[in-house]
Amino acid sequence: MTTVISVIYCILGVALAALVLMQEGKSEGLGSIGGMADSYWGKIKGRSMSGNLEKFTKYGSMLFLVLTLVLNILMK
């Protein structure tokens, strides 16, 4: 049981690192000065690729935290 959870934990850790690296930066640059930050893609962010990456990162990190706690309990 511990071995299976540990393998899932390692795969999830690598996947989370890849998801974080695939995301765009939060700085808007000079576009935020002129109001360009509120563009079409900014309004539908939940349906865009960056919105999906953020969603997967959020849920993956929650699962990572739960697996960390489970592994901590099982290793004692």
Image (cartoon, rainbow, N blue to C red):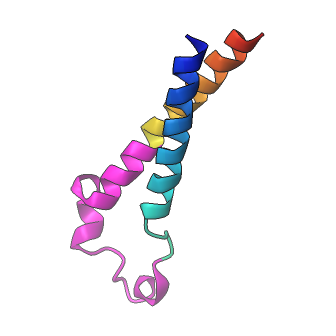
Spot occupied by residue 58 in the image (x, y as percentages of width and height):
46, 42
Is the N terminus in the top left, top right, bottom left or bottom right quadrant? top right
Is the C terminus in the top left, top right, bottom left or bottom right quadrant? top right
Camera-nearest residue between 45 and 6 = 6
Q: Does residue 30 lie above or below 43 as drawn?
A: below
At x 71%, y 18%, the residue is 72
Q: Does residue 73 lie above or below 30 as drawn?
A: above
- Would residue 32 be found to the left or right of residue 48 on screen? right
- Residue range (magenta): 28-57
Q: Is residue 26 magenta?
A: no
At x 53%, y 28%, the residue is 7
Q: Does residue 25 lie above or below 3 as drawn?
A: below
Spot occupied by residue 47 in the image (x, y as percentages of width and height):
22, 54
Q: Does residue 22 lie above or below 38 as drawn?
A: above
Q: Is residue 42 magenta?
A: yes
Spot occupied by residue 4 in the image (x, y as percentages of width and height):
52, 19
Q: Quadrant of residue 75?
A: top right
- Would residue 59 be found to the left or right of residue 68 on screen? left
- Would residue 48 be found to the left or right of residue 69 on screen? left
Camera-nearest residue between 45 and 50 = 50
Camera-nearest residue between 27 and 14 = 14
For the stretch drawn in magenta, the main secondary structure is: helix
Q: Among all residues in the image, which is located at the extreme right?
A: 76
Camera-nearest residue between 29 and 2 = 2
Spot occupied by residue 11 in the image (x, y as percentages of width and height):
49, 38
Image mark count:
0
At x 21%, y 71%, the residue is 40
